[in-house]
């Protein structure tokens, strides 16, 4: 990894490094969530729906505000993923294993983890229902359920021929799991060929050549395509028919305060909302700081004053060591952090994407200490003036 001072030299870089060290010191060592010491309850001061970027970040912030015992996160998944790194995983620049950690390790210590799926929201009665037949009530609700991928709404799956070739003689070495995989293969209509060893790739013709290991010398040529899919997306099903949703099914929040437009004790963050900005982890970081201040004032019966400007960031990977860092607001106007032209391909921005941002995510954002680069932007530009 290129040292930070090599990325942006000078006093501002040193200040940036100091801020990172301070944030890490504040965050403290990573603590494994082992479940709250008290028995699971059916009412919480703050109930967070979703264990993704927005949910975990806000749970950490709310823990400091009302106490861990008064906060719960509803999330069925066993693992938490840092999704922005997947663009590099797909290109072979990062390992898939680096993108995920056990959910138990990111849920703030002491916060109740309700391992269930939300099946119904009833904001008129200040409660939700889960798939294990529990009803949980709340004083404040934060909805962070993310987004749902719709690979099936395109009508093209029936035209796709998905082939899995393996040099092994079985799909998996343990029968119990092999049987489960075979069931999935049947359900999804996949083609699996065993004892097929890849011996040549004809890139100019988009052909792969396999040798039959049971019959040495016998080969088969399979034409292939490489497709990077961005599937249709939409709000989670549980939101579509919920009272908290707008006509399109997204959580209907004020775009500046993130407070729900009809239910003052309900809030939204991240991909599940109808905020008119790109759905990125960077946007969630900026939203978390605003939402923290919004809830603080609402709890004091005061009017929110801090306003979200739609900030989001999209690191555009243009090569294995170059990134264009796009940052913009609701108006699609550039809202750049660094005192240089970010429309240029830069190694420094690649290092930030590949190494610095994952560090900030795991060690600061998920612990509620990173609300986006607004303060850095002010410091950089003050230093230039």
Image (tube, rainbow, N blue to C red):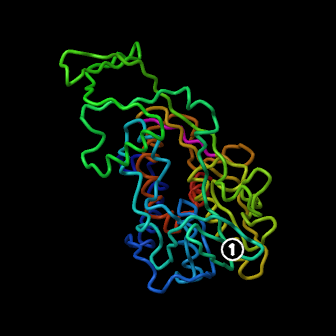
How many numbered badges does the structure rendering display? 1
Is 213 situated above or below 253? above
Q: Position of residue 208 (x, y in %)?
A: 34, 20
Q: Position of residue 157 (x, y in %)?
A: 56, 32
Furthest residue in direction top, as rendered: 205
State the extent of the magenta-drawn residues as a range.
321-327
Judge the density around disc 1: few (<14), some (14-19), many (≥20) Cα neighbours within 10 Å. many
Q: Residue at x 53, y 65 (%)?
A: 75
Predominant SS of the magenta segment: strand
Which of these two is toward me, 66 or 100? 100
Element type at mark 1: helix
Q: Hey, which quadrant is residue 297 in on the image?
A: bottom right
Furthest residue in direction left, as rendered: 216
Which of these two is toward me, 236 or 303? 236
Is 47 situated above or below 181? below
Q: Is residue 353 left or right of residue 199?
A: right
User: Magenta includes 79?
Assistant: no
Q: Position of residue 189 (x, y in %)?
A: 47, 35
Which residue in the structure is indicated by mark 1? 295
Q: Residue at x 70, y 71 (%)?
A: 294
Q: Residue at x 69, y 53 (%)?
A: 310
């Amino acid at each position: 990894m290129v040292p930070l001072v090599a990325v942006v030299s000078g006093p501002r870089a040193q200040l940036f490094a100091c801020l990172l060290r301070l944030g890490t010191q504040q965050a403290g060592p990573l603590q494994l969530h082992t479940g709250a010491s008290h028995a699971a309850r059916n009412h919480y001061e703050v109930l967070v729906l979703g264990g993704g970027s927005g949910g975990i970040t806000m749970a950490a912030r709310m823990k400091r505000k009302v106490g861990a015992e008064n906060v719960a996160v509803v999330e069925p998944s066993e693992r938490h993923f840092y999704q922005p790194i997947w663009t590099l995983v797909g290109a072979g620049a990062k390992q898939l294993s680096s993108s995920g950690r056990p959910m138990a390790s990111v849920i703030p210590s002491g916060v109740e983890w309700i391992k269930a799926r939300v099946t119904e929201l009833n904001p008129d009665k200040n409660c939700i229902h889960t798939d294990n037949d529990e009803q949980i009530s709340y004083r404040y609700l934060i909805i962070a359920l993310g987004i749902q991928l719709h690979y099936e709404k395109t009508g093209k799956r029936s035209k796709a021929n998905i082939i899995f070739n393996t040099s092994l003689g079985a799909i998996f070495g343990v029968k119990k799991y092999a049987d489960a995989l075979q069931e999935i293969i049947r359900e999804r209509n996949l083609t699996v060929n065993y004892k097929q060893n890849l011996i040549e790739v004809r890139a100019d013709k988009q052909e792969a050549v396999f040798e039959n290991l049971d019959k040495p010398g016998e080969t088969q040529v399979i034409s292939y395509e490489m497709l990077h899919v961005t599937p249709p997306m939409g709000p989670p099903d549980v939101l579509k028919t919920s009272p908290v949703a707008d006509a399109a099914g997204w959580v209907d929040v004020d775009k500046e305060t993130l407070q729900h437009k009809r239910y003052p004790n309900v809030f939204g963050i991240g991909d599940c909302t109808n905020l008119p900005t790109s759905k990125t982890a960077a946007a969630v970081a900026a939203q978390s700081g605003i939402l923290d201040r919004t809830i603080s004032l609402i709890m004091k019966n005061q009017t929110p004053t801090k306003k979200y400007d739609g900030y989001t960031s999209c690191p555009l990977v243009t090569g294995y060591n170059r990134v264009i860092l796009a940052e913009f607001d609701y108006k699609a106007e550039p809202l750049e952090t660094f005192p240089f032209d970010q429309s240029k391909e830069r190694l420094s921005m690649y290092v930030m994407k590949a190494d610095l941002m994952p560090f900030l995510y795991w060690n600061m954002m998920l612990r509620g200490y990173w609300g986006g680069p607004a303060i850095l932007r002010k410091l950089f530009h003050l230093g230039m003036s």
